[in-house]
Amino acid sequence: MTLSGPPASGTSTLAKMLADDCGFTVMNGGDIFRNMAEDQGMTIAEFATVAEDDPRIDREIDDRLEAEINAHLEGKRESGDTGLIVESRLAGWHANGQADLSVWLDAPVEERAQRLDERAETPIELREREMSDAQRYQDYYDIDIADLSIYDLVIDTGTLSEEGMFQTVKAAINDVQRRSASSVS
């Protein structure tokens, strides 16, 4: 499963809820980006600005995610583990139709800025970061991040509660699993 969305849209919250409920393993591209920024002694916004001119940063994130996914899949064969959530802004795009379910979460920028209060990003800074990210994705991968046509499910987390968001995605997961099981039989 892929789980994508802009900063503070609820992807980490949903991933944790699904991991707790279903036992899924979570691979988080945002954590990798934050760790890389911290390693460089930069804020996320500062690091995003550097990443605009240095494609190696995005490629390193992709390489780290791919390595973690491959390690998980190898372990899955050995342990019988069944669930993986790849959480990153481009996870749906990078999955290239291979995920059982691709989900995009979003919420109004003002609400997401409030959620990011502890990171001290204003709505203007958040918009600037998102514009910077969108330009990088276009330049590096020829991806229009605003094109949501690749997602199976798009949810406005400004409308639904955390529980509503969880129940909606859980119902989709259950449906995908039922359809998959019936097509094997």
Image (cartoon, rainbow, N blue to C red):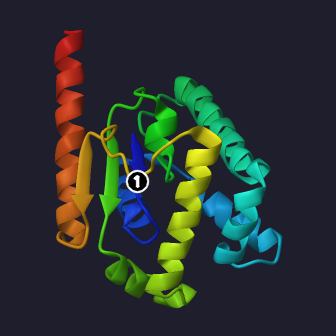
Count of marks placed on residues: 1
The answer to whether 75 appears left or right of 64 in the picture is left
Counting from the top left corner in percent of width and height, residue 84 is at: 46, 40
The residue under the point 40% across, 32% down is 99
Above or below: residue 140 compared with residue 184? below
The amino acid beneath tag 1 is Ala
What is the residue that sits farthest to the top in this orientation? Answer: 185
The answer to whether 164 appears left or right of 102 in the picture is left
Q: Which image quarter: residue 63?
A: top right
Regarding residue 21, the answer to whether it shows in the image is no
The residue under the point 37% across, 67% down is 10
The residue under the point 47% across, 74% down is 127
Regarding residue 3, the answer to whether it shows in the image is yes
Q: Which image quarter: residue 181?
A: top left
Q: Quadrant of the N terminus?
A: top left
What is the residue that sits farthest to the right in this orientation? Answer: 40
Above or below: residue 16 compared with residue 93? below
Above or below: residue 58 compared with residue 74? below
Counting from the top left corner in percent of width and height, residue 107 is at: 30, 70
Report the residue marked by disc 1: 19
Above or below: residue 164 compared with residue 146? below
